[in-house]
């Protein structure tokens, strides 16, 4: 019996000691509670959580950011527990939208559910808040044309083409370079050489997230097309690999570079002038807008949902003139600048 | 028996505190979620407990969960295997891994830690290889098969709560394991060899065979767990599916009274240990906004539980020794 009492006493001390001072049970604060669930732990989401916090304060809701550290199983557990808590709204970036429909529909039945960052169009979610990758790709293509007003040859590098966001991002880039009208349904096979508008797109090389292969792709391109004018890296890790190869080959600055996302090496390259520009998403607004929409929905205001069930958080172009400001803001939001 | 009492009291305490702090805790929905999560963790914990009871360790549990969890949907949806063939394949692979571990450990005399650590790396690597790091899932298909994990069994006279199907697997596995461990000669051999392998060998027990059996049970249950996990979540990412599960399973087994030195352990205790881990995580989600520190809280609670347990055991031993000494010195 001694054993039991000892453990009970120790556990009681610990558990009461860990109890948060903030009211956490439902109803005690009277505020609506909403949650922003990410698809993992990343600095991208730290920026989004700053937006979640700001919107929570502005719209008077108790807004929380949850980052599942254990993939799909962890995300499922978090959503289930949020439903148990009687949460008033959930914004989620589903890790595998096609296969998580069951879970998302269960959540949609019990609370207000919206998707952000990555959509699950087959589920009963109320709205998708995020970026249109086709449009973001077009911004990238515009940067290519801006860097090379007289045209030239272009090679595109990307992780893989199986996922929808990658496909759309690449197609947007190609369509903008070639000056085609907007049509997200286009698809050019990766191996074909495309010409138009004074540009020649040599092809699209994928690396399946294998950095060594990604680097080899750039090296092989330089060997095969020594006179290539421009390289476009569409996944966050592509531009740093391209920079490394160009540096080793002594071609930094000779080959124009267009990037995507905000890797430190990419931003440093823009500062130095070795990268012409990059296209960045706006995770802060993902967080802010999600909480705003959930707060309105929780109040019963369904007018926040547009007919097409999509709120576009447009991507932005970053060039030499605004890179310092962007980077400082990024550091402030991720807390790394403090 | 005392060990189970302590851990059960801790579980009850955590449940009571959570129920007071969160009104949702005792809802049928939450109890169902907890029962399902406990069942899934319990199944792999029982497996690893057999290995621990023989004085070994299996670090490959999470990777076997990943291999089977990714392998099953991959075979069914990408390779278009028939369901019986795919199920047989994952079962064979799971059992084969157990035999592989057991044989290397007993015949080549290589430490279980090393063998299964290499397994931990290999099986996840293999899963990432054949899936090419792509997420694999069942889509909207195989709903019949998925009821093995997602099915709900209604209990007569009980409203608002249905028993999640994985609990049935857990109950069957636990019952068989308890009978095997306590009521069969093989089970007694396992406990004996865990306490003192040489003594067991000199008593005529084929210890090698028993060790291999323990690793096979462990891998087979890990495979079963992996299958149920993926049927439940409908999708698996090879890069993190089942990550760290070996450590949860070992924690549940140790909490439940298994000694890492071998020779000790009860099945009921392991189930209570698994439940405690899942309830702690649930408590943190339901009552706080600090889910990122949940491992710190779980780790601290578990450590305090184990330390308290050890201190009390020593205290009891000293008192017994003192009483024995007193009885000796006192002339009757």
Image (spheres, rainbow, N blue to C red):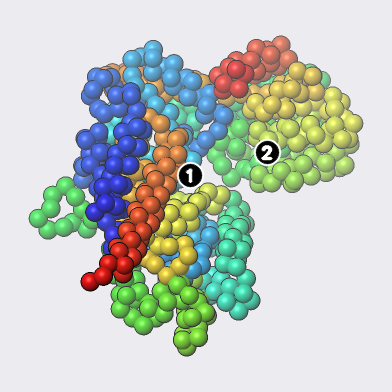
Please report the residue visible at 62 percent of the width from the left and 74 percent of the height from the top.
B109
On the question of residue A124 being in view, the answer is: no
Answer with the quarter of the image where residue B322 lies: bottom left
Up-down relation of residue B187 to residue A40 (above or below): below
The quadrant of the picture occupied by the N terminus of chain B is bottom left
- Label 1, label 2: how far apart the Cα atoms are: 23 Å
Q: Which residue is mark 1?
A: A71
Whichever of callouts 1 and 2 sits on the residue coming sooner in the sequence is 1
Element type at mark 1: helix
Up-down relation of residue A259 to residue B7 (above or below): above
Of residues B294 and A80, the one nearer the viewer is B294
Q: Residues within 10 Å of mark 2 (few under 14, many from 20)?
A: many
Element type at mark 2: strand
Mark 1 touches mark 2? (CB < 8 Å): no
Please report the residue visible at 79 percent of the width from the left and 19 percent of the height from the top.
A272
Q: Which residue is mark 2?
A: A158
The chain ID associated with circle 1 is: A
């Amino acid at each position: 019996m001694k054993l039991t009492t000892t453990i009970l006493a120790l556990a009681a001390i610990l558990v009461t000691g860990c109890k948060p001072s903030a009211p956490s049970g439902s109803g005690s604060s009277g505020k609506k509670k909403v949650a922003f669930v990410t698809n993992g732990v990343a600095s991208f989401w730290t920026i989004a959580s700053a937006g979640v916090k700001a919107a929570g304060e502005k719209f008077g809701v108790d807004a929380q950011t949850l980052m599942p550290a254990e993939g799909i199983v962890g995300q499922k557990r978090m959503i289930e527990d949020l439903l148990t808590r009687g949460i008033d709204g959930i914004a989620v970036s589903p890790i595998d939208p096609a296969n998580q429909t069951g879970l998302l529909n269960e959540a949609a039945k019990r609370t207000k559910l919206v998707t952000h960052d990555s959509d699950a169009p087959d589920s009963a979610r109320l709205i998708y808040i995020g970026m249109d990758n086709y449009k973001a790709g077009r911004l990238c293509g515009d940067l290519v044309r801006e860097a090379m007003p007289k045209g030239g040859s272009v090679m595109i590098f990307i992780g893989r083409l199986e996922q929808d966001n990658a496909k759309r991002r690449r197609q947007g880039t190609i369509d903008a370079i070639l000056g085609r009208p907007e049509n997200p349904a286009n698809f050019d096979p990766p191996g074909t050489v495309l010409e138009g508008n004074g540009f020649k797109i040599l092809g699209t090389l994928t690396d399946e997230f294998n950095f060594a292969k990604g680097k080899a792709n750039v090296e092989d391109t330089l060997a095969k097309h020594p006179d290539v004018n421009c390289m476009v890296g569409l996944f966050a890790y592509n531009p740093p690999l391209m920079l490394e190869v160009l540096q080793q080959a002594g071609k930094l600055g000779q080959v124009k570079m267009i990037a995507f996302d905000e890797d430190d090496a990419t931003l440093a390259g823009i500062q130095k002038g070795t990268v012409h520009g990059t296209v960045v998403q706006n995770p802060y607004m993902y967080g802010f807008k999600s909480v705003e929409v959930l707060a309105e929905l929780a109040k019963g205001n369904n007018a926040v949902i547009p007919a097409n069930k999509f709120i576009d958080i447009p991507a932005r172009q970053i060039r030499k003139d605004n890179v310092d400001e962007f980077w400082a803001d990024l550091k402030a939001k991720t807390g790394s600048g403090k | 028996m005392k060990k189970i009492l302590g851990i059960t009291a801790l579980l009850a305490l955590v449940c009571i505190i959570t129920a007071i702090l969160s009104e949702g805790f005792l809802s049928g929905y939450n109890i169902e979620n907890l029962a399902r999560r406990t069942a899934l963790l319990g199944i792999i914990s029982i497996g690893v407990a057999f290995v621990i009871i023989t004085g070994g360790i299996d670090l490959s549990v999470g990777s076997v969960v990943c291999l089977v969890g990714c392998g099953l949907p991959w075979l069914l949806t990408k390779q278009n295997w028939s369901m019986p063939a795919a199920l047989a394949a994952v079962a064979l692979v799971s059992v084969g891994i157990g035999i592989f571990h057991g044989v290397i450990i007993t015949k080549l005399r290589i430490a279980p830690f090393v063998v299964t650590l290499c397994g931990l790396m290999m099986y996840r690597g293999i899963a990432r290889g054949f899936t090419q790091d792509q997420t694999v899932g069942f889509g909207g298909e195989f709903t019949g098969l998925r009821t093995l994990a997602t099915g709900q069994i209604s209990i007569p006279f009980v409203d608002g709560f249905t028993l999640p199907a994985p609990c049935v697997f857990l109950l069957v596995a636990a019952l068989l394991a308890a009978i095997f461990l306590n009521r069969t000669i093989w089970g007694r051999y396992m406990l004996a060899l865990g306490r003192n392998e040489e003594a067991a060998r000199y008593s005529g027990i084929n210890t090698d065979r028993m060790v291999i059996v323990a690793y096979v049970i462990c891998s087979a249950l890990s495979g079963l767990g992996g299958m149920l996990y993926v049927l439940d979540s409908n999708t698996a990412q090879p890069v993190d599916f089942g990550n760290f599960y070996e450590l949860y399973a070992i924690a549940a087994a140790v909490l439940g009274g298994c000694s890492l030195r071998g020779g000790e352990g009860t099945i009921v205790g392991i189930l209570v240990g698994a439940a405690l881990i899942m309830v702690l995580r649930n408590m943190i989600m339901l009552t706080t906004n600090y889910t990122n520190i949940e491992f710190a809280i779980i780790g601290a609670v578990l450590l305090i539980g184990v330390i308290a347990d050890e201190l009390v055991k020593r205290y009891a031993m000293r008192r017994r020794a003192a009483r024995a000494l007193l009885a000796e010195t006192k002339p009757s």
